[in-house]
Amino acid sequence: ARIVVLVSGSGTNLQALLDAVASEGAAEYGAEIVAVGADRTGIAGLERAERAGLPTFVCRVKDYEDRAAWDAALAEATAAHAPDLVVSAGFMKILGKEFLARFGGRTVNTHPALLPSFPGAHGVRDALAYGAKVTGCTVHFVDDGVDTGPIIAQGVVEVRDEDDESALHERIKEVERSLLVEVVGRLARHGYRIEGRKVRIS
Ligand code: GRF
């Protein structure tokens, strides 16, 4: 399967996918990353892609007259690489109608909380502030809501009394990276069906 990864930051989830393909081989893993897209320049995620010799593209919201135009441009730039699957790994923009018209049902997102708890851009901070005793990460298909699509897999992480947001997020990311590698490989190697809120991977 051909995969395009969308990033907005450090790209450690992207790196985990790159490392999995490199160590297992694209045939064995069942997928290859063909391009990396971002909504901003100057991020480590793009450097990781360039180091891996991958094509990259950047679509910045401010370069377009409105959000719909940005969404259409992102969809175009993504489609240029003919992906079978799109992975949003720390991509911090909501994918809109245009993008989902083309890639809905084959775009997955990873979120650093146990959805439906703590959706949105501050899932780690919100779980900590709430006093949750366990949190974790969720890999799900993207639908037209915010972190509301059908859940594929989740991983649980204990919250420790001494945790601050970054310590907890780092621990979550350790689980998140292996969960994402495992899910993406399974989706790539096997067929899958989305039945309402259930995901069946054959
Ligand atoms: C991940 O925890 C992701 O779930 C969240 O931001 C983090 C991105 O990390 N949205 P990275 O850019 O993959 O290192």
Image (cartoon, helix red, strand yellow):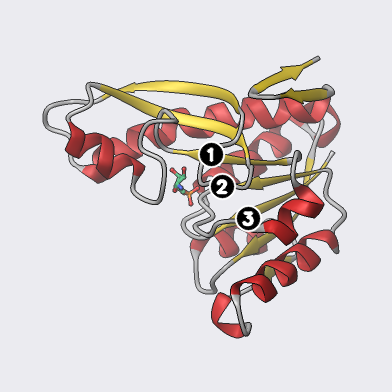
Dot label at residue 6: 3
Question: Are the two marked residues, 1 and 2, in contact with CB atoms closer than 8 angstroms?
Answer: yes
Disc 3 is placed on an element classified as strand
Observer-nearest residue: 43 or 135? 135
Disc 2: which residue: 89
Q: Indicate the position of residue 163 as horizontal and vertical percent values.
A: 17, 35
Disc 1 is placed on an element classified as strand
When asked about the image quadrant of residue 59, the answer is bottom right
| Badge 3: residue crowd in 10 Å (few <14, some 14–19, many ≥20) | many
C-alpha gap between disc 3 and disc 1: 11 Å
Cβ(mark 2) to ligand 1 < 8 Å? yes
Q: Amino acid at mark 3?
A: Leu
- Quadrant in which the C terminus appears: top right
* Residue extending furthest toward the top: 202
- Quadrant in which the N terminus appears: top right
| Badge 1: residue crowd in 10 Å (few <14, some 14–19, many ≥20) | many
Q: Amino acid at mark 2?
A: Ala
Observer-nearest residue: 183 or 67? 67
Residue at position x 70%, y 69% in the image? 57
Q: Indicate the position of residue 16 as horizontal and vertical percent values.
A: 58, 39
Disc 1: which residue: 110
